Image (cartoon, grey):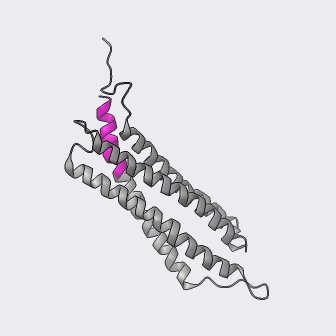
Amino acid sequence: MMTTSKLSLRQFNWDALVLLIVTFWLSSSALLDFLLMPVMYESGMMKGPEFATAGYSIFGIFNRVELLCAAAILAGLLALRQRRGQFDVVASGSQSRWALMISGALLAIAFIYTYVLTPHMGALGLDLSGSFGGQAQPMPRAMSYLHAFYWGLEAVKLIAAGWLVKLCYRDVAATFE
């Protein structure tokens, strides 16, 4: 006897797409935060005058990818609200609201990274690289606050994205039971 999933060939699985985008975003954030940045720090690149420009370029590009991911997640969840299934995250009103609030928070975090933190940190970094008489300038206190704010938002982003993965995974698993 052949078993088939509840998903026909004509239906698009928005849950799986949202889950794929969230896991891509989580893994790329973890790669950037826990591999790339420590390697750059240990190699001494952060002390060089070119780091401000390189960091601004790396984070500027990654922030745009984060905006695309957040927008795609929100669009996918809104599409799920239009096609309610018995086991979907949107079948439960509270789960649907939580998923939309989480995706909205993720989009807000991506906007803050792109349009607030990265430009300010880049500007402070450029001030650091413009040393007088060949001597490096000490890191301003504002840079420390911006780093703390970044890591706080990063923790919120990782927790929120993990919660969204949990919500969507249940729906994807239920689709194929």
Q: Quadrant of the C terminus?
A: top left
Q: Position of residue 119 (x, y in %)?
A: 57, 72
Tell me the chief SS of the magenta region: helix
Residue 76 seen in this snapshot? yes
Q: Which residues are magenta?
A: 164-176
Near-viewer residue (116 or 162): 116
Near-viewer residue (43 or 128): 128
Q: Is 165 placed left or right of 51 in the picture?
A: left
Q: Which residue is outermost to the right?
A: 133
Q: Position of residue 51 (x, y in %)?
A: 69, 70
Q: Is residue 12 above or below residue 54?
A: above
Q: Quadrant of the N terminus?
A: top left
Q: Residue drawn 46% across and 62% down?
A: 110
Q: Residue drawn 79% across and 88% down?
A: 133
Magenta-drawn stretch contains 169: yes
Q: Is 113 placed left or right of 99 in the picture?
A: right
